Amino acid sequence: MEAFSELPGFSWLTETVPEEMRGRPQWVGWRYERRKAGKPAKPLISPYTIRKGSHSNPRDWASLSHAVEAIFAHLDQFEGLGFVFSKDDPFTGVDFDNCIVAGEIMPEVWEMVLALDSYTEISPSGTGLKVFCKAPRMDYGKKADGKDSQGIKVGDTEIYFAERYFTVTGNCVHSPGVINDSTEAVSVHFEKVMKGKGEKDKGKKGKEERINAGATPPCLQSSAFPMRSS
């Protein structure tokens, strides 16, 4: 039973978020945290302890219903919901930062979104896109401790297989409610990122044709966590 769908501001959970994600106990909360410099951090908040948790410790994750209940019980401790990528699920996350400028999505990023063809949201900042899809783990290399790395970041592009969470806003711009197998597209994009081609050309401003995202997307919400804006 998804009682949260009846709560004010949370109907988008069943309207846009894929059922395959909703049914997994990999949900967390998050909140903004100031840094000395740069943009605010978004630490994962465990729905059980209402404290900072870990994206590598399943004990800090919960069912979607429990996560929503925790948020309602502690509204001042959360900004929104998040979903953790695990080695035990088939999902991969692709994150495009700084790709929405003046309400318009950069065409090269939109091309990649269309190629991935899976559930895609606008990030809480309103300047990025997050794609949730299915793809097997690629060879990300090793971390400093010798363990397999579960993701890669080059420039404004990130790809993660596990040990990372993505915020979930419901601000859907492509493939609402559907999470597809994007193995081929992820593989192609992964190779580009590995070669350093994932970083956009920061010298180009305003001259290239852009895809208009100013019109309201299919499931656009006004905030990452509607209850906080009401």
Image (spheres, rainbow, N blue to C red):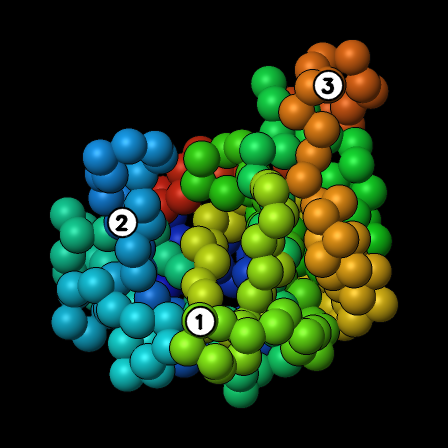
**Which of the two residues, 73 or 36, is positioned nearer the viewer here?**
36
Q: From the viewer's perspective, is residue 207 above or below residue 224?
A: above
Q: Position of residue 12 (x, y in %)?
A: 49, 53
Mark 1 vs mark 2: give the one in front: 1
For residue 166, say whether it is visible: yes
Q: Which mark is residue 144?
A: 1
Q: Residues within 10 Å of mark 2 (few under 14, many from 20)?
A: some
Which residue is drawn at the image coordinates 45% and 66% (left, top)? 164
Indicate which disc, 3 or 1, sits on the residue closer to the N terminus.
1
**Which of the two residues, 154 or 20, is positioned nearer the viewer here?**
154
Q: Position of residue 101 (x, y in %)?
A: 61, 23
Position of residue 65 in the picture relative to residue 48 (left or right): right
Q: Residues within 10 Å of mark 3 (few under 14, many from 20)?
A: few
In the rendered structure, which amino acid carries the disc numbered 3? Lys
Q: Please name the residue that numbered disc 2 is placed on.
A: 31
Locate the N terminus by quadrant: bottom left
Label 3 – label 1 distance at C-alpha: 35 Å
Query: What is the secondary structure assignment of the residue under circle 3?
Result: loop
Q: From the viewer's perspective, is residue 192 above or below residue 179?
A: above
Q: Position of residue 110 (x, y in %)?
A: 76, 40
Q: Please name the residue that numbered disc 3 is placed on.
A: 204
In the rendered structure, which amino acid carries the disc numbered 2? Arg
Locate the C terminus by quadrant: top left
